[in-house]
Image (tube, rainbow, N blue to C red):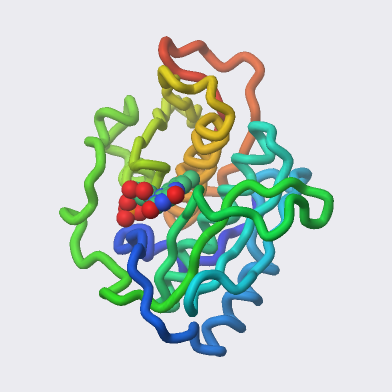
Amino acid sequence: MEFLHHLIYPTIFTRKTTRNFNNSPIPQDALDRLRAFTAEVVPIFPSERAAFEILPHKGKTMKISAYAKHDVISLINMAFMLQQMDLFIQTIGMGAQWNATVSAAQKQYQEFPYVISLVVGVSKEAPARTSAAQFIRKQASEISNKPELPFIGAVRLAPSSRNRQLWYLACGEKSIDFYCRKGGFISNTILKNLNWLDMGIAVCHAVLALQQDGHTPNAVIKHDAPDKEGYSYCVSLD
Ligand SMILES: Cc1cc2nc3c(=O)[nH]c(=O)nc-3n(C[C@H](O)[C@H](O)[C@H](O)COP(=O)(O)O)c2cc1C
């Protein structure tokens, strides 16, 4: 896998969702940088495709609308890419919010169906956290068999829909298997999609932390991944 933008890694430890936006426009310089970043964002699977459209949204905010096929791998890949944008936006001092309730400007863009948007704008409050204690998250031991590994700390802080944190990382000698906890309401298509997006976000944080530590992880789908009761297997990093 290509290297992700090194500047966004530290933002994992300070990022937060912005819900109150200011009534001032995003500075032109920030918008130019965001457009340039969006064009260069790295996929987890080079064969997968996603499209992103930057559009005006409510008030002075903008939205990055994301489009991809609604299958597991495409959704994981798209979220892996959009999370790099979430971090980049906050790296340049703007506020960002994954938002599943924003409707599509168009049903399809570049042949792909609409999935979700990231709202972007000038935050009313400070757009960053100042300490790890401000994250409301599960313990590392609840999300992995190797909670002491540094990249688990980066995954633990990842955002997820309704902060559900459904991920579990089974770490072996040479590979990390990502599992998603099955929920009672998983048959609902929209929620199911959100689960795969959450998994793509977790993989993004893992790859950033592993690359930061000098590793060169590659994403693979294992057809012989062990079953884990109550969980669905998603993807692995080798
Ligand atoms: C896929 C996804 C969808 C989300 N949808 C919404 C949403 O519709 N409305 C909202 O206010 N927050 C939404 N969020 C933000 C989460 O609620 C938030 O990330 C989580 O509560 C953790 O808080 P934090 O991002 O401040 O760390 C979404 C997050 C993700 C990853």
Position of residue 25 relative to residue 217, above or below, is below
Residue closest to the far left: 133
Where residue 92 appears, x then y in whole percent? 44, 78
Q: What's the residue at 39%, 31% (across, down)?
A: 166
Whether residue 62 sits left or right of residue 20 in the image: it is: right
- Residue for point 40% across, 70% down: 95
Q: Is residue 214 left or right of residue 142?
A: right
Q: How many badges with numbers are in the image?
A: 0
Q: Find residue 64 and report its image quarter.
A: bottom right
Taking 233 as reference, is 76 above or below it? below
Q: Residue 222, percent across and down?
A: 63, 23
Residue at the far bottom in the pictured view: 28
Screen quadrant of the C terminus: top right
Identify which residue, 233 or 176, lies in the foreground: 233
Residue for point 45% across, 18% down: 231
Above or below, 168 against 7 in this view is: above
Residue 158 can be seen in this image: no
Q: Is residue 43 visible?
A: yes
| Residue 74 x/y as whole percent | 68, 40
Q: Position of residue 141 (x, y in %)?
A: 25, 30
On the image, which quarter does residue 131 sit in?
Answer: bottom left
Q: Nearer the viewer, residue 168 or 1?
A: 168
Residue at x-position 33% and y-position 25%: 145
